[in-house]
Amino acid sequence: MKRDRSKLVLGAVAYDAKVVTIWDGFLRWFEERSLPFDYVLYTNYERQVEGLFLGEHHVSWNSPLAWLQAERLAASERRVARAIAMRDTDQDLRSAILVRKDSAVNTIADLRDKRIGVGAWDSPQATILPMLHLAENGLDPERDAKIVHHDVLVGKHGDHIGGERDAVKALLAGTIDAACVLDANVLGFTRDGTVASGALRTLAVTEPFDHCNFTIVDGDDAPAGSIAKFTELLFSQDYSDPAVRPLMDLEGLKAWKPGRVERYAPLARAIDRFRTIEPWLKARTETTA
Amino acid sequence: MVELGALGLEQGGHILLLRALREAGEGGRVCVSGTHPDLPLQLSVFAREGAHQIESPAPDERKEGAVCALVAGSSLNARQRGAVRAGSARADHRTLHSYADARWGLAARGALVEAGAPSWDFSLNDRDLVWADEAKKLYAQALASQWDPEEAIPWNAPIDHPPFVEDAIVQVMTYLVENENAALLVPARFLGRIHPHFREVVQLLAIQIADEARHVEVFTRRALLRRDALGLSTVGGQRSLQTLFEESDFVLSTLLLSVLGEGSFVDLLWFLHEHAPDPVTGAIAQLTARDESRHVAAGMAHVHAALEARPEDRSRAQRAIEQRHLALQHTSGLNAEVFDALVLLAAGGLSPAAIARGFDAVQRLQSRMREGRQRRLERLGFTADDASILAGLHTRNFM
Ligand SMILES: [Fe+2]
Ligand SMILES: [Fe+2]
């Protein structure tokens, strides 16, 4: 069999049914602008990272953790992964550690021996980064506290906010003493009625970090010029253009930005500290060696 | 400076920020002060999601209490850019657009519709085929004339006529329900095709359909007042109604249903009122006749406006009446049981003299109906000769 190499192929994780709507919309939009385009969906980011390296697709729409997985897998193969674009809303996120308004917990040290609710174990924003924040501020979360996971859709790297919502509900119900959520959800859970206004208090906030990016790896076999065309078209998307605004609303951005990788530093520190991806990386490098 | 005090963005503070940013315009700078403990975190989320820049306040701004400064991003009014007005809110035939745009969709007439809105397939989007200035007034009248069957009809009034009269009533009610079903469903099928831009027309049809629903109810209830079973529904009657159903042109359908059919029904219902053997039947006939008069007025207004706008459609109207006549000429027309029941009701007794009186009354009813159809067709601009011929071609089923 000869592979069809006429199109730029994107990989995305199907964390929600709307992912199909989004990428079908982008497909049409790219094709109308003379970029032959297709996409493949994965059920989890690990499979997607593997797919990128196996040449199943050319550009991955990666979570921050998947980005680091790709970056390190590339390094092990003497290849280079690059982040080529991201949403404006992927930049400078923070996570908050919430407690109940009347809680006796006023400092991170007060969380000693307490139950700390986090999201899915592979969620950067709801689990890994808040745990790093605790660890770097004197509380080893695994040793000094009880971590309660709310594992919704593992493999999706926390893209689905169900885990965070469950953690907040558990906090309100009193079955845990603190909950870790993304800054936007601190607001969102109040607006959608999950949390009564003023019922929770922000105990701590992580340093800023970046979220998803489009990742490529050198040595791909994307059609010549197609990746440059892909980013050029993305950067041309204008939120005031009604033809593309619905897609941008679905994908949750107002403008695309060039990729940057400095703000993945906290997550890189965290996965070194917690050895989050070590078994996965080891298994991949053994099989590819 | 937007002073939020203790108000957080999760409690609606964003409304004040957006007002200030809109006022400042793209690139405009807005300082924010407030004491909510999460305010800095909330502001960074707000800025990120709205694509506004967030900056540290200058020293003098800080002195005035600013927590941060926001610089309005370009997406602030993106939804208004390129948006179009869905016509003007207050409209009559002169000022309405001749076509309602598919992209106005369900938007209120006169609303600002974001560009890129989905296209809606309302096939009745042509003002000339849909609109009548009278719709607004007729809708208001219909609303003011609604009645509650429970209150308006003396359901417990005595019924002491002989069984043959009650049998006649049940047969007539059976026939009426069948025809009311058509009067309900025919406009209902058009209602879903009319562009909601023509709001008053949609409202008028909606209330008319509600009237018909009530008619179905009261006729059914009267039929079952003393009996457990209804009368006969005939092939001829249903064939006639089916030709009404099959008319897919809104204007022609209104002509056949309202101008000719409901017009004849008004006469029929007043006839029933006059010869009602009991107060229940009398009240029902009177109340439904009044409703039907409004339906006829609405139909007249609709067809009149449509023929004014397109005089060439007059010949299509003529053809539609003729074709329906041809389609029905080999059917029996009016249910014979209904005809006889009407005679018996007008007779009030079984003596030959009474029957002769009743028969005469029904014949007079039929010529009244025909004259009424001719009068209405003339008012719609048909010549007296044409109107006379067309009035005679109307279905023998009355509706
Ligand atoms: Fe009716
Ligand atoms: Fe009617």
Image (tube, rainbow, N blue to C red):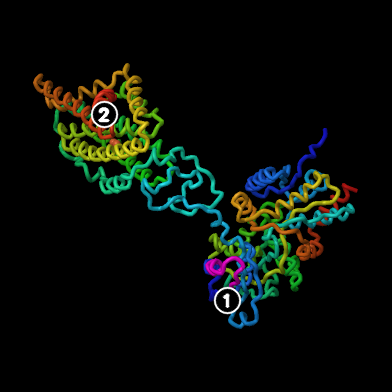
Q: Chain of mark 1?
A: B
User: Does B266 sit above or below residue A268?
Assistant: above
Mark 2 CB within 8 Å of ligand 2: no
Q: Which residue is mark 1?
A: B33
* Residue A39 occupies quadrant: top right
- Mark 1 is on which residue type? Ser
* Residue at figure coordinates x 38%, y 29% from the top left: B245
Q: Where's ligand 1: which quadrant?
A: top left
Q: Earlier in the sequence, mark 2 or mark 1?
A: 1
Residue B396 picture location, percent across and down: 27, 23
Q: Are marks 2 and 1 on the same chain?
A: yes
Residue A211 visible? The answer is yes
- Mark 2 is on which residue type? Thr
Q: Which residue is mark 2?
A: B383
Please give the label number shown on residue B250: none
The answer to whether the residue labelled 2 contacts the one labelled 1, judged by CB atoms less than 8 Å apart, is: no
User: Does B275 sit above or below residue B87?
Assistant: above
Instruction: Identify the secondary structure beneath mark 1.
Output: strand
* Residue at figure coordinates x 22%, y 27% from the top left: B370
Looking at the rendering, the stretch of residues picked out in magenta corresponds to B18-35
Residue A20 picture location, percent across and down: 65, 45
